[in-house]
Amino acid sequence: MPRPILTADRMRAAEQAAIEGGTSVETLMDRAGTALAEAVHRLAGTGDTLILCGPGNNGGDGYVAGRKLVERGHRVRVAALAPPASAACVAAASRWDGETVTFEQASPSPILVDCLFGTGLTHGLEATVSERLSDLAKSASSAIACDLPSGVGSDDGRCLSPVPAFDMTVTFGALKPAHRLMPALPSMGRVVLADIGIDASSTWFEIGRPEVPALAAAAHKYSRGYVAVLAGEMSGAASLAASAAARSGAGYVRVIGDGLFQGLPASVVVGGKLGLLADDGRIGSVLIGPGVGRGAGAKALLQAALDCGKPLVLDADALNELGANPTGMSDAILTPHAGEFARLFPGLDGTKPEMTLQAARNSGAIVVSKGPDTLVASPDGRLGFAPPAPSWLASAGTGDVLAGIISALRARGMDAFDAACAGVWIHGRAAELAGPLMIADDLISELPAVLA
Ligand SMILES: NC(=O)C1=CN([C@@H]2O[C@H](COP(=O)(O)OP(=O)(O)OC[C@H]3O[C@@H](n4cnc5c(N)ncnc54)[C@H](OP(=O)(O)O)[C@@H]3O)[C@@H](O)[C@H]2O)[C@@H](O)CC1
Ligand SMILES: [K+]
């Protein structure tokens, strides 16, 4: 099951529903603190532990975790930034009878647990507080954040004050958008999700390993997925996309264009008239964008794609050619990077999740908003958050490869949203296997291993 993602408001609503269903907030906090302690102990082993506690329920989780870690043999000190303020935090703190120091007295410890603020953060930490948090996190061997690193905006991933890097973040019920959004993402470390008995079902989720449909025993090359790639001025980009489509299990890949397509597998067919797009009922998806250029030729290719009535994947130059605020794009997948997104959907505001969903609703298309925090949005409200991808994916041609993978999965019969999510996951995994010095071509070589 993919891990659900909830905004702070929706998390509070889920918490409230659990409370109305008979589970007290103290019980939820007890489960959260116990899960936090368990994760800290497993990550860091037994050792001297400093827990920074804030005044709200994030701090309350810390007092519970302190008690549980003492039971596990840790020497625990709690440093309270402010007296407990929420009722549940007051109750949890009243059961803490271990060593307590002021925040100013907090000294470095091998294990640091940050329970200052979670989803209730309303503004950045005071400079002296964020500086001390950073110093303590840097000098710890293991730094763990409770729910969110303190200073991170739960819904938008903004760092409202400087946020140090943590080795692990333990969250409860559901992930929060910030766990998978920039700029907060690199501070999270491994994100562990603890079940505390809340119904956190959501149409927002972290994209997990996809289930790519198995090939039917009676499959033939066309039924396995026929991808048509429209090529323009820069043949290399089309070659990358077509090769990626072929290596992603498409049964037949055709490149329609006039260039010299170097590096294409011999099995990829080159040539054919544009009229094929509408006439050939076997075509499962049409990809346009990689290397298509920006001239009159590109305009004609785009028009042919838009008119052909086949599932579309639009990338790169095709997105620029499409113009601002496209509408009525049902059965299309748009894969803009941040610059292309801003040109395609000017005037949207809100968090990246909100803007990506709005773009999908306005256009009618599946929108893959690419970046170090790629999101996939459907007009029906589904929103997939990519798991962290290696930074070395940011190099020329990797977007062409992604578009090729998605086109193949779409042609193989996957639903457009599922194909886009699966493509994003497969692409990130291929990058992990290809390693830091990879170039886009290397991603294609890794696809069989990822898809096997
Ligand atoms: N959802 C669930 O199911 C469960 C959630 N649980 C836990 O609860 C956490 C959310 O708790 P929460 O709502 O009490 O908010 P929390 O993050 O502790 O902070 C609120 C306090 O901080 C203050 N404050 C804010 N920013 C500040 C700043 N920059 N500098 C100084 N003060 C600042 C703010 O004051 P205010 O600004 O409102 O005056 C208020 O006093 C959640 O992250 C999870 O760990 C679990 O216990 C179990 C189940
Ligand atoms: K925290």
Image: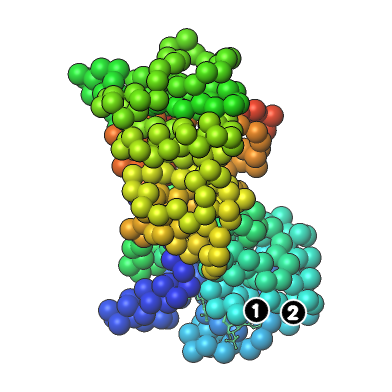
Q: Which residue is mark 1?
A: 123
Does the rendering let one see residue 374? Answer: no
Which residue type carries mark 2? Glu
**Does ligand 1 reach within 8 Å of label 1's beta carbon?**
yes
Residue at far left of view: 218
Label 2–label 1 contact, CB within 8 A? no
Residue 105, given in percent of the width and then of the height, sits at 78, 78
Quick check: is the Cβ at mark 2 less than 8 Å away from ligand 1? yes
- Residue depicted at x 40% and y 54%: 327
Of 28 and 364, nearer the camera is 364
* Relative to 144, residue 419 above or below: above
Q: Residue at x 65, y 33 (%)?
A: 396
* Residue 45 rendering spot, x and y as whole percentages: 60, 54
Q: How many marks?
A: 2
Rendered location of residue 410, percent (x, y): 35, 35
- Is residue 304 among the parts visible in the rendering? yes
Q: Residues within 10 Å of mark 1 (few under 14, many from 20)?
A: few
Residue at 73% in and 59% down: 140
What residue is at 70 percent from the left and 65 percent from the top?
163
For badge 1, the amino acid type reads His
Q: Which residue is mark 2?
A: 126
